[in-house]
Image (cartoon, rainbow, N blue to C red):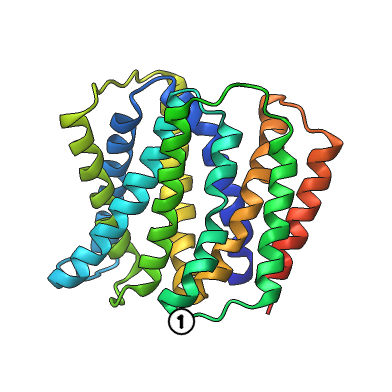
């Protein structure tokens, strides 16, 4: 059962890029994320109570989980949502943050003392080449500089969050840890709203459907799976599956949004799949 988790994660995480655009078209990105993670925090709180988990934790465990949420739910997702709201093509945003495994592999050795093998590096590089083929030649629109900067910041944040999560000293139940991480993300976006943004949300049917998808399937589903994978695998192996995200997102866009999917895209998807297999197999 656990072996299928990476595949479920890929499908759910890829679908998040598809539903981000309708969300930022109907709201300020930071208001939408504050709204999202308020509900996520409440959801994990209720589940923790139902499953009789200990809610009150040590100050150290709280700070570790809270800061992880600031990095992941706050800076990473905030950067992605903001960049797309400024006109960054969704595919380019997905491709840039998919550079995460390269940074994680480069840093997991000196920081986590993990051994990153030549085979893993070959897989990572193949994955990057495949992801570039899938999206790189299909982009014809201009890339806004502010969107590019925001996406690079998001890339740094998700890499830092992955390594930080792996270094956490606590063994909190996933629901409790996720609750404090969601709280960290919510408070981060509230601070951004107070000082920098003009919040608004149009609760249209499109927004409600897209937001429901991201709350229930992505935050409750995909993120919990990701935390499980990081906890039970090496950081470098876990993030290698992210190379499948751009290709899967492109396929979903073709399937649901009638966007084109060329022979080059299919070749890139195949190369990416091979790269991920090489990087993650034992």
Residue 78 in percent (x, y) is at 36, 39
Q: Position of residue 206 (x, y in %)?
A: 47, 22
Classify the position of the C terminus by image quarter. Answer: bottom right
Residue positioned 49% across, 76% down in the render: 109
Looking at the image, which residue is at 55% across and 62% down?
239
Name which quarter of the figure residue 44 lies in: bottom left
Left or right, 233 with respect to 227, comes to right
**Mark 1 lies on residue:** 113
Residue 209 visible within the image: no
- Of residue 176 and residue 161, the one placed in the foreground of this image is 161
- The quarter in which the N terminus is drawn is bottom right
**What residue sits 79% from the left and 54% below the top?**
271
Q: State the image quarter where residue 276 is shown.
A: bottom right
Q: Position of residue 84 (x, y in %)?
A: 47, 29
Callout 1: 10 Å neighbours few (<14), some, many (20+)?
Answer: few
Q: Is residue 161 left or right of residue 262?
A: left
User: Which residue is pictured at 28% across the width and 51% down the height?
Assistant: 70
Q: Secondary structure at mark 1?
A: loop
Residue 121 shows in this picture: yes
Query: Where's residue 67, x and y in %?
Result: 25, 58
Q: Give the total of numbered labels.
A: 1
In the image, residue 202 above or below residue 114: above
Viewer-proximal residue, 164 or 187?
164
Look at the picture and state if 281 lies above or below 158: below
Q: Nearer the viewer, residue 227 or 135?
A: 135
């Amino acid at each position: 059962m656990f072996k299928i988790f990476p595949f479920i994660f890929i499908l759910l995480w890829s679908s998040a890029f598809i539903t981000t655009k309708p969300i930022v078209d109907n709201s300020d990105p930071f208001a939408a994320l504050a709204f999202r993670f308020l509900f996520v925090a409440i959801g994990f709180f209720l589940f923790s109570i139902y499953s009789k988990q200990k809610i009150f934790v040590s100050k150290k465990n709280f700070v570790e989980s809270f800061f992880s949420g600031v990095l992941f739910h706050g800076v990473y997702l905030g950067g992605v949502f903001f960049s797309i709201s400024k006109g960054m093509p969704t595919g380019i945003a997905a491709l840039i943050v998919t550079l995460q495994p390269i940074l994680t592999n480069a840093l997991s050795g000196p920081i986590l003392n993990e051994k990153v093998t030549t085979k893993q590096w070959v897989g990572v590089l193949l994955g990057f080449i495949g992801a570039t083929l899938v999206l790189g030649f299909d982009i014809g629109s201009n890339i806004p500089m502010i969107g590019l900067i925001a996406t690079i910041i998001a890339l740094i944040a998700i890499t830092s969050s992955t390594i930080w999560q792996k270094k956490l000293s606590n063994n909190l139940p996933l629901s409790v840890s996720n609750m404090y991480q969601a709280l960290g993300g919510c408070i981060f976006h509230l601070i951004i709203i107070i000082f920098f943004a003009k919040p608004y949300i149009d609760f249209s049917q499109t927004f409600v459907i897209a937001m429901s998808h991201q709350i229930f399937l992505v935050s409750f589903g995909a993120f919990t799976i990701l935390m499980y994978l990081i906890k039970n695998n090496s950081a470098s192996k876990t993030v290698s599956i992210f190379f499948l995200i751009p290709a899967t997102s492109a396929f979903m866009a073709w399937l649901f949004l009638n966007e084109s999917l060329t022979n080059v895209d299919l070749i890139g998807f195949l190369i990416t799949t091979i790269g991920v297999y090489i990087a993650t197999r034992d």
